[in-house]
Image (cartoon, helix red, strand yellow):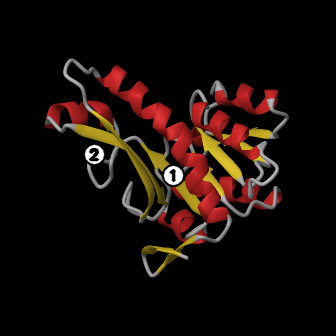
Amino acid sequence: MAVLISGRGSNLQSLIDAAKAPDYPAQIALVVSNKENAAGLDVARRAGIPARVIPHGNFESREAFDRAIDAALRDARIDLVAEAGFMRIHSDWFAKTWEGKALNIHPSLLPLFPGIRVHQQALDAGVTESGCTVHFIVAELDSGPTIAQAAVPVLPGDTAETLAARILVEEHKLYPAALKLVAEGKVKLENGRAVFA
């Protein structure tokens, strides 16, 4: 599999750690970042995983950027894509090309609070719990079928930062588990739904 990142790579590290288990069904063969200063690139290098930088600003359109990513994925013979803090919206072309083979983790209980500033959205709404969602990537932002979710309480006095930190702990457990299900064929995207075997 390949992991697409834009930032610090904490979910990447959790996937690297999970893939060390001899029975884990997916190995990370490539890390791609759209930012050359992403700290996650160092996480990949320390683990001995090939890393590539494909700056989105070098392309005239979203689809042209996505086609460059697609070429890198195909060069590395990737079967499964895991997006982990990859802060770019894909073209419809990419979503269709990798349909059922591309996953994302989002720091809310989707369909609540898609997009950005998620933790502040949750606090502003006054919800009593939030969490994270692993979902298949589809053309519509943060709206793909859910594979797995984990919830955490929203505590009195929480800030966006404290809530984010609590959710991140769950992300690091949920993402490797959800990816394992997909890699083993125990959940598939069929007719716009996540179907569990």
Residue identified by numbered label 1 = 104
Total labels drawn: 2
Residue 90 in the image: above or below residue 6:
below
Q: Quadrant of the C terminus?
A: bottom right
Which circle marks residue 55 in the picture?
Answer: none
Q: Quadrant of the N terminus?
A: bottom right
Outermost residue on the right side: it is: 48
Give the image location of residue 46, x and y in percent: 80, 27
**In the structure shown, which secondary structural element does the residue marked by tag 2 occupy?**
loop
Residue 74 in the image: above or below residue 110:
below
Residue identified by numbered label 2 = 113
Give the image location of residue 163, x and y in percent: 33, 27
Residue toward you, 95 or 175? 175
Residue toward you, 19 or 64? 19
| Left or right: where 82 falls relative to 145 | right
Q: Residue at x 46, y 58 (%)?
A: 135
Dividing the picture into quadrants, the one containing residue 26 is bottom right
Give the image location of residue 100, x and y in percent: 56, 69
Q: Residue at x 74, y 46 (%)?
A: 19
| Left or right: where 166 falls relative to 84 | left
Q: Residue at x 61, y 31 (%)?
A: 9
What amino acid does circle 1 point to? Asn
| Left or right: where 27 falls relative to 94 | right
**In the structure shown, which secondary structural element does the residue marked by tag 1 occupy?**
strand
| Left or right: where 45 falls relative to 95 | right
Q: Are marks 1 and 2 in contact (CB under 8 Å)?
A: no
Q: Earlier in the sequence, mark 1 or mark 2?
A: 1
Give the crowd class for mark 1: few <14, some 14-19, many >=20 residues within 10 Å: many
What amino acid does circle 2 point to? Phe
Q: Distance from label 1 to label 2 (Cα)?
A: 15 Å
